[in-house]
Image (cartoon, grey):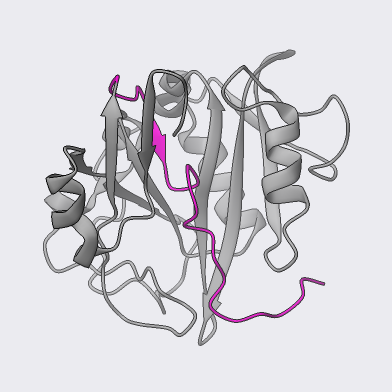
Amino acid sequence: LYSDRKIGSTGVADTAIGLYGLLKYRIDRLQHFYMLSAHAQDFKLIKNPPVPRQLLHIEEENNRYRFEPVVGIGATGTLFGDRAKTEQYFINKYGKHPYYRYYAYNIMDGAEQVGTSVFRVSEHNGGRLLRHIDFCGEASVFQYLYAAFQGLLKRHDCEALEYYCYGIDLTAGGFFNMDDTAGVIVPYHFEPYAEKNVHIHYVYKGESPRYVFKGDNDRERPGVLVDKE
């Protein structure tokens, strides 16, 4: 979250929020969204899931975009990038990560590539959670990706997709907002596992960021050092 006009972080411990306030940082919280798999037979990780599983009826015309897998995050010329998040940014941060395996997908509008999303899978006790980590592109596409997201959940055999972000309302795309579904638990910690929701705060100085995602800092720190396969 750094440029010549702003500086910020999503890696903010609860105990440090007061200190950032004293340093005149602005403090806010990422919104926590989740989508439940329409293919899941039971939920091992998500506690008290809403019924019905999808609150919104998503019309077929809203399924405009599709995900196209990137064959190796380091494959030259396959990732959408801009000045803030270049192709090399994705390669260095995710393709070369020594412990976590990431899955990159280009977002396609017909033959046109309009963005790139990065995901990771966490699992515990037979349950699998698909986690959206980072994105580059125009975020308005997310309201048209319901069928594509359901396809990813089925592809990765996950019961739900979680999404932490600022600046985007994902409910129009079939997500639940955690703030609107009391009693639901979508676990955050897997190393070690803890059955609880977690708020992610971010701080910044200068120009307010347009979007903020979970991967926009150092949140991707493994708690268990196991080399990826």
Quick one: quadrant of the N terminus? top left
Q: Is residue 33 part of the magenta span, yes or no?
A: no
Vertical placement of 135 versus 33: above or below?
Answer: above
Q: How many marks?
A: 0
Q: Name the residue at 67% across, 47% down.
A: 93
Q: Which is the main secondary structure of the residues drawn in magenta?
A: loop
Q: Name the residue at 78% across, 38% down.
A: 70
- Outermost right residue: 76
Q: Is residue 228 part of the magenta span, yes or no?
A: yes
Using the image as rendered, state which of residue 224 and residue 140 is in the foreground. Answer: 224
Does 1 sit left or right of 151 as displayed? left
Where residue 131 sits in the image (x, y, percent)? 50, 55
Where residue 201 sits in the image (x, y, percent)? 26, 50
Does 24 sit left or right of 209 as displayed? left
Q: Name the residue at 75% across, 65% down.
A: 98
Vertical placement of 112 versus 88: above or below?
Answer: above
Using the image as rendered, state which of residue 38 and residue 97 is in the foreground. Answer: 97
Where residue 158 sits in the image (x, y, percent)? 54, 64
Q: Quadrant of residue 174?
A: top left
Q: Is residue 198 visible?
A: yes
Q: Quadrant of residue 108?
A: top right
Quick one: quadrant of the C terminus? bottom right
Q: Which residues are magenta?
A: 207-229
Using the image as rendered, state which of residue 47 and residue 224 is in the foreground. Answer: 224
Q: Is residue 51 visible?
A: no
Vertical placement of 165 versus 17: above or below?
Answer: above
Does 156 sit left or right of 170 as displayed? right
Where residue 82 sits in the image (x, y, percent)? 63, 18
Using the image as rendered, state which of residue 78 and residue 109 is in the foreground. Answer: 78
